[in-house]
Image (cartoon, grey):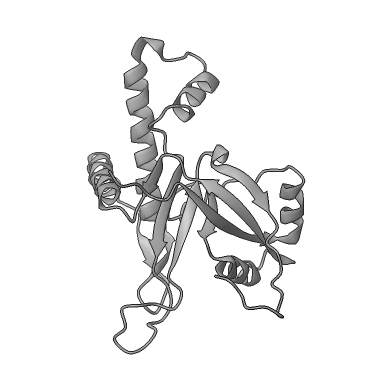
């Protein structure tokens, strides 16, 4: 059986003050926006310092743009570059669609916000991923049966310690203009990671500055 990468380097664009605090022992807080395309969690750009820095530079809430590096163990990863996992997400969408229809509620939409038809407001995708998390949580509860804990804290711990709990999500995001007329490549394609299990983070680091006297190593 083939597997997704187990250990990767991720970069998180943020304010320099956050980088300093995390390197001193604080933790990054998960993003919980309704439009987060990979659901709720801590987001990283896989292997792309440049994209993380560009994001920080464009964010109006960031006063002093900086990049925090992280060594990440993906654990039980929902890898959306793997067709087995994309099929799971499709099935989750169908389940969510039926549930909302039965309640007389509409599905949220992914809003087109780019001239190339790319959505950066992914409320539908976020809800689908969150529904998948709930499906797994319910399955764990059914599996434990009589051993299901009584307190909410113990229940949360039982879910988050279970082998089927999704530790991370990995997805490719197409973005930007075509590299040339009729090209199938876009100038800003990237892979993003959403970390739901903080233990995926082996450690954080401050990316070193390149010495311009030498060639840069990719």
Pick out the residue farthest to the top: 146
Residue 200: image quadrant is top right
| 63 lies left or right of 168 | right
Is 69 drawn above or below residue 203 in the view shown?
A: below
- Residue 211 percent location from the top left of the image: 71, 74
Residue at image position (71%, 80%) is 213
The single residue placed furthest to the bottom in the displayed view is: 181
Residue reaching furthest to the front: 214
Horizontal side of residue 42 vs 36, given as left or right? right
The picture places residue 64, in percent across and down from the top left corner, at 74, 66
Q: Is residue 154 left or right of residue 107?
A: right
Query: Quadrant location of residue 173?
Result: bottom left
Residue at coordinates 41% horizontally, 81% vertically from top-left? 177
In terms of depth relative to the viewer, which is nearer, 178 or 95?
A: 178
Q: Is residue 63 visible?
A: no
Q: Position of residue 194 (x, y in %)?
A: 49, 50
Quadrant of image for the N terminus: top left
**Is residue 141 at all visible to an observer of this figure?**
yes
Q: Nearer the viewer, residue 18 or 152?
A: 18
- Count the labels in the image: 0
**Spot occupied by residue 68 in the image (x, y as percentages of width and height):** 66, 57
In percent of the image, x 58 and y 50: which residue is there?
71
In the image, residue 97 sits, relative to residue 209, either above or below, namely above
Residue 212 shown left or right of residue 30 in the figure: right
Residue 163 versus residue 118 in the image, above or below: above
> What residue is rendered at 46% in x and 14% in y?
149
Locate the C terminus and report the quarter of the image it occupies.
Answer: bottom right
């Amino acid at each position: 059986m083939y597997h997704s990468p187990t250990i990767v380097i991720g970069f998180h664009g943020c304010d320099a003050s956050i980088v300093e605090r995390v390197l001193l022992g604080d933790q990054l807080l998960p993003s919980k926006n309704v439009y987060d395309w990979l659901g709720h969690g801590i987001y990283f750009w896989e292997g792309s310092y440049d994209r993380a820095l560009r994001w920080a530079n464009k964010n109006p809430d960031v006063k002093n743009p900086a990049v925090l590096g992280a060594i990440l163990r993906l654990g039980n990863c929902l890898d959306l570059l793997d067709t087995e996992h994309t099929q799971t997400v499709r099935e989750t969408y169908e389940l969510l669609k039926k549930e909302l229809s039965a309640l007389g509620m509409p599905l949220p939409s992914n809003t087109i916000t780019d001239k190339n038809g790319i959505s950066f407001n992914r409320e539908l995708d976020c809800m689908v991923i969150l529904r998948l998390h709930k499906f797994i949580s319910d399955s764990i509860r059914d599996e434990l049966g009589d051993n299901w804990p009584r307190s909410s804290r113990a229940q949360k711990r039982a879910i988050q310690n279970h082998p089927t709990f999704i530790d991370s999500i990995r997805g490719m995001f197409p973005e930007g203009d075509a590299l040339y007329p009729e090209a199938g490549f876009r100038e800003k394609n990237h892979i993003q990671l959403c970390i739901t299990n903080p233990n995926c983070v082996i450690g954080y680091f401050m990316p070193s500055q390149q010495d311009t006297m030498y060639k840069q190593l990719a």
